[in-house]
Amino acid sequence: MIPQRHRIFEQIQLYATAYERTFSLGVAFVIGIVAGFSAIAVRLLIEGAHHIFWRVPELVQQLGAANWFGVLLVPALGGLVVGPIIYLFAREARGHGVPEVMAAIITKGGFIRPRVALIKALASAITIGSGGSVGREGPIIQIGSSIGSTFGFLLHLPPRLMRTFVACGAAGGIAATFNAPIAGALFAVEIILGDFGFISLAPIVTSSVIATVVARGFEGDLAAFVVPHYSLVHPVELVFYLGLGLLCGLVAVMFIVTLDRLETLFDDRLKIHQAVGPMVGGLVIGAVGIFFPQVFGVGYETMNSALRGEMAVGLVFLLILVKMFATSVTLASGGSGGIFAPSLFMGAMTGSVVGHAANRLLPEITASPGAYALVGMGALVGAATHAPITAIVMIFEMTNDYKIILPLMISTIVGVLTSNYLHRESIYTHKLKRKGVILEKGMESNLLKSIKVQDVMRRGFESVPHDLPFNFLIDVLLQTARSRVAVVDDDGGLVGVIPREMAQKFLSEKDLLSELIIARDLVVPDPSLLYPEDTLELASLRFQEYDCRELFVVDGEQTRRLVGMVRKGDLMDAYQREMIKLESGATFAYNINRRHRMEPVNVMDGYGILEVEAPHEFSGKRLRDLDLRNRFGINVLAIKRSGGVGRNGARMWVPESSDALEDGDVLVVLGETEVINNLRSRW
């Protein structure tokens, strides 16, 4: 049975490799269907939870208590249910979901536990339905990503395809939510993957479109918001939209900082147990909601009121701050929900305030407050997520009106620039940074930033003394394989460089100039210098800027003592090695989560990570006594044990030297591949 199953998976993997484009599109099609239905299911779950929980105030009134007491209880009761569910079954479902998906892409090769989809759907529906001040988009994104990851997991696909399918699920989720297939695909690429050149766009677009078709088929071509008629009344209005962008950038930074401070308060200072935290947060939300019921739930109705220009400017201004606080409390206390809808909410309120001010100052040449609210939605989402393209396209898809593009682009770009200037991290990457996961836009940039020049520079290279006679210098230039020769002074300091083509220029005058010119007379300054602590990213930029084949490295700005040289080939070799390490790490993280025997992972030439079943004579012995490192040259990275009886009930764990082995244990070991294979055959 097992061999047959493995043969099936091997055939799937062979087909996926041979016909990757067709295979990816087919799987993306299925993921889009499932993601679309999942988005519909989450909406229905939220409506059901809302119907159940908001009967509590009626019951409280029937018992003779005041209505406000019932309002206070509803979010707390929701938190009382959500806290234990998340804590016991899937702690990844805590919070707004997107950073967890990004972390899975970076650290686990795209692996997300299948149960996360179910727990996230249930926890988010209860949180939102009971009044939690969060959005449904983040949960749907995480649910879609979990679905994509599960498909890759079940088909035993490598991390590269796993990441593609995770992005497909995320795109399908956001597209089905906002009826915006293009924005869904862009969201997956710009935010989830973080690199437009990272992977093929076709499967992601396919999943996004199919999920939208499914959502439209069941719910009709309904827009998420009642979008007002838009027109740019006068070019002077662009000044107000510029100001709106600045204000949205400031509000976005306030939101990021507020969420971070409250997360620190709940996690580090109050030290409330994770199972109880959502209930405490629910009490706070209930207290706020007594005075500002608009903060309960997703808030689409309030946003539509702002888009229609029906809200008083004083209330609109207060709701910016109140929604920011309520959303931050809901997420920081451990509730489950997204930040996308709250960002849209605060953007609509911010735009409405600016629109009211513009109408009061220049009523004849400004649009309605609703038009500014619409633009503010895109600007604040872009500023909070640092994803301007997604924000612009999403609002455009919601309006289908080219007239909005210019104001929308101005406000969104200015908002993103303001937010990025004041706070480098987005609301997603800030949470990752707090967890120690560093994300850079673009895999190439990220890898090159991780390597120092001193790690790859050559210490043996050609240089000539500054007083070298011209005839000897010509010989050096003619014989060197480098494009430039370094000239150093008596203390080893770099004086400058001499291009190789200088030899051809003066070759005919070699005898005439031999007694007149020395090397120092021909040097040119070298502005492309590097220091040992510089990164290879900077070296890559210098290679492009100065169009040379090698860069010289000096020990400091003052001494300029020549200590090394970096060739363009050295940079490419280092990049390739890091890519191999990254892919090996992702493959290991992906395979280690499987119940079946993991595939060998090549770490470098001759070395790998493999599974070895511990022989019977190891049973009952501790790792320190077995001394496998000295005896066989292997390191035990993890132990797999059937039956779920490992440390803390885990089926797999990183061992300590005091751990004793049992019959049937499988060791995940690192060492020479040939040695490990020999041990597998002997054991």
Image: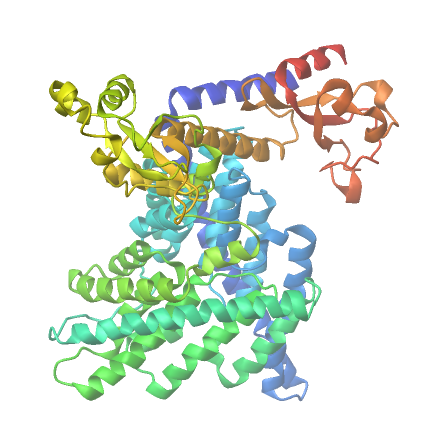
Identified at 29% across, 20% down, the residue is: 480
Residue 424 in the image: state x and y as whole percent: 41, 60
For the image shown, how many numbered marks are present on the structure?
Answer: 0
Identified at 59% across, 21% down, the residue is: 607
Nearer the observer, 189 or 439: 439
Identified at 28% across, 64% down, the residue is: 412
Residue 481: which quarter of the image? Answer: top left
> In the rendered image of this protein, does residue 150 appear above or below residue 618?
below
> In the rendered image of this protein, does residue 64 appear above or below residue 434?
below
Residue 107 in the image: state x and y as whole percent: 54, 42
The answer to whether residue 46 shows anywhere in this view is yes
Work out which quarter of the rendered image holds the C terminus and state it.
top right
> In the rendered image of this protein, does residue 61 appear above or below residue 370?
below
Nearer the observer, 222 or 79: 79
Lateral position of residue 87 relative to residue 512, left or right? right
Residue 595 in the image: state x and y as whole percent: 66, 30
Identified at 42% across, 80% down, the residue is: 319
Residue 193 in the image: state x and y as whole percent: 41, 44
Lateral position of residue 218 relative to residue 289, left or right? left
Nearer the observer, 313 or 658: 658
The answer to whether residue 297 shows anywhere in this view is no
